[in-house]
Image (cartoon, rainbow, N blue to C red):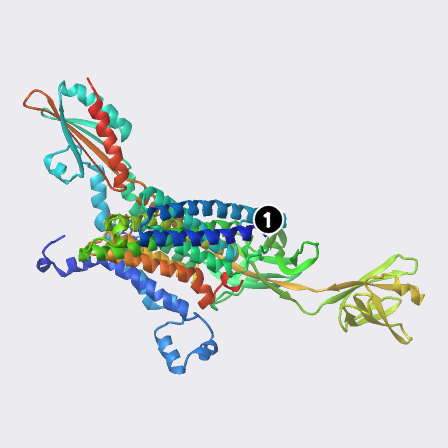
Amino acid sequence: MINVRLFDLTTLLFGVASVNYVAALYGKRDTLARIGTWICVAAAVVSTAALGVRWAESYRMGIGRIPVTNLYESLVFFAWAVNLFYLVVEWKYKNRTFGAFVMPIAFLTMLFAFTNESSIQPLVPALQSYWLHAHVITCFIGYAAFAVSAGVAAMYLLKARREESKTPGGVVGLFPSSKALDDLVYKAIIWGFPFLTAGIITGAAWANYAWGTYWSWDPKETWSLIVWLVYAAFLHARITRGWHGKRAAILSIAGFLATVMCYLGVNLVLSGLHSYGGS
Amino acid sequence: MADDKRSQSPMDKVWNLFTSLKLAITLIIIMAVASIFGTVIEQNQPIEKYRQFYSDATIRMLDALNLFDMYHSWWFLLLLVLFTVNLSCCTLDRLPRVVKVVRNPKTRLDDGLEKTLPLVDRWKKKGSLQAWAEKYAEVVGGAVGKPLVTQNSETLHLYAERGVVSRFGVYVTHLSIIIIFIGAIIGNVFGFKGYANIVEGQSVRSIPTRGGSRPVDLGFEVRCNRFAVSFYTDQFGNPTQQPKEYASDLSVIENGREVLRKKIVVNDPLQYKGVWFYQSSYGPAGGASARVRVSSANGGPVADLSFHAGQQVEIPGYGTITGVDYQQDYRGFGPALLVVLKKPGGQATEFWLLQGRPDSDRQRQDPYFLSFGGLSQAYYTGLQVARDPGVNVVWLGCALMVLGIIIAFFMSHQRVWVRLTPAADGRVEVVLAGSASRNRLAFERKFEKIQDDLKALAV
Ligand code: HEM
């Protein structure tokens, strides 16, 4: 199927872009990073086209539906969103060092998607709901923002340590100032948090419409709440003396680990009502 | 609030604890970590299930800690209560101050205020104070909002602000959490959750609830007229094993009259008088029954029969028939039913009826012949039944939460002051200052623009 080939191409592009960004950082060659940017733009075009083609293909198969309904589709949608978020950040901050920390996340996601069943399957009755679309899209935009935030938080921790020891130079010297990084960690979460909140709410609305309980403490729901709580803690840490900076950055990374657990771990490790793991 | 720790009374200490953000962060993290346990240890399983995974000693320990139903345990509830108290105290502590600041804005830029502001600029111009004030008011009005002009002896003050509501976003968010809790409590106290398995053609009136308390009397009946599963077809149009739809045709019957009828599917429930019925499961009800038509030799229909395996039915004036066997594919002819026909006083005869050949039985050359119309399987539909009078309160809270977060994050309280004073040299001394509660970078740019526009003006 064409869409899957296009996603394979996207995977390749993300991989090359990641290598470029990392190499640019170590070799201090801005040209490499600039090429990385254009590869990311190309990947954005290809993956957007792939999503569109997949959508159209599902209609041709007579089971038309938005492509965000199984593990494969959610992974590629997540990577798509991470890439777009990254491009916006790079453009706004005029700094390409972020790429080495963010694009590998998109690349690894696509690699993982590559190992999963990629054919278009019709929806089981439980998933036939408009709430599904609202739920998945909001959740994954939130997750993508958190991925960007965690990547930048890692940069922050490196940069802050370097600034403390007052040893200049090295790769870390190219990073934006720790203040700017701290600000970006926060900004990304400012976007992620409302989307995650909306994602949890649409999930609850859907559950209520499908079986009459908006909250049943199943592991997936509970983990989404844990993620939400970690970022709520982050938001309050930022405005508390003695808690911003390093602790906030650690909370951002913890939040993203919880996000990964919520997204994949629950299905791979725990059991629950959500269907992705079985497929 | 007392600043000196030693002079605090115990009341103050408690108040300070409950208005502190540190407690909030600590509670939030404890709740997050505690919640993990409930996802690692499966909740509310029968004891046999736990025995497969844990030793008896472990089970006793986990049970003592309420970890098998932790989200309803006293300590988790206590956490929620502490959290709510913390949130409420914080709000009571801060909201009045915010309201005061919003209702009595500092409309005059004095020296003390000037020192606290991040963006300040000053210059001098020739001309009249009043004339400049009018011109500046126009520019500031266009950029931020119509300024309030006040006079203090010789000095003129301009003050403009926008986005005051952004100060309340946080409080809307916090309030929304409490509203959601209230909605959840209403649902738990006044609602119920139950289930009903209804065989096709039958109805129910009382619903057993989950949690085992008394069944709920609905005050009306719900009948399942029919249940059906449909399957997806492959690209050649042949049915696959993948279910496409589970549908129940339901009727609501009140005082013996049908008042509502609806086909429900998963994700599209029926609602009547606040009670919702959700398609949840299904299953076969009893054995399958065979449909057999009796016709007279000239082809006119006499009777349509439906019977289970082994059941004997009588055709008046002819005899009794019994279905004794069924084959999905009888000698390559497709589905077939083996029947035994016994006429009064006669011998029992046994023969196959082919579903694909309704006329095959004519070969017996009897006054009547039989045709097999296929098997019917009766189903029961499994419904979740719920009444939750708190759910709309929860949705209200959710809507407010999203709204509050958006206000808190993406709106900014922007303030601009201009002070015009007659200087000793006869010119007018102008001081421009501004601040924004959020997104300071964007405001800085706006401020620079105002600065340039003001300086470019001429009288
Ligand atoms: C998980 C539940 C909570 C959520 C989702 C939440 C949400 C928020 C949000 C979105 C902000 C704005 C943050 C910012 O401006 O960067 C905020 C600020 C704040 N929250 Fe919470 N909050 C929660 C719990 C609490 C609790 C329990 C307290 C109790 C002490 C609290 C006290 C505060 C305070 C004092 C602020 C700062 C207000 C200000 O800027 O004037 N929050 N909260």
Tell me if residue A213 can be seen.
no
Q: Is residue B22 left or right of residue B50?
A: left
Q: Is residue B337 left or right of residue B249?
A: right
Residue lying at the far left of the rendered structure: B424
Residue B405 percent across, percent down from the top left:
34, 47
On screen, residue B207 above or below A129 = below
On screen, residue B328 above or below B53 = above
Q: Secondary structure at mark 1?
A: helix
Where the C terminus of chain A falls, by quadrant? bottom right
| Label total for image | 1
Viewer-nearest residue: A77 or B255? A77
Chain that bears disc 1: A
Residue lying at the far right of the rendered structure: B365
Residue B193 percent across, percent down from the top left:
49, 61
Tell me if residue B117 can be seen.
yes
Q: Amino acid at mark 1?
A: Glu
Q: Quadrant of residue B201?
A: bottom right
Residue B326 percent across, percent down from the top left:
77, 70
Which residue matches tag 1? A57
Q: Quadrant of residue B350?
A: bottom right
What residue is rendered at 37% in x and 45% in y?
A34
What residue is rendered at 37% in x and 61% in y?
A258
On screen, residue A48 above or below B54 = above
Q: Quadrant of residue B236?
A: bottom right
What residue is rendered at 40% in x and 46% in y?
A35
Viewer-nearest residue: A10 or B35? A10
Pointer 1 local density, CA inside 10 Å: few below 14, some 14–19, many at least 20:
some
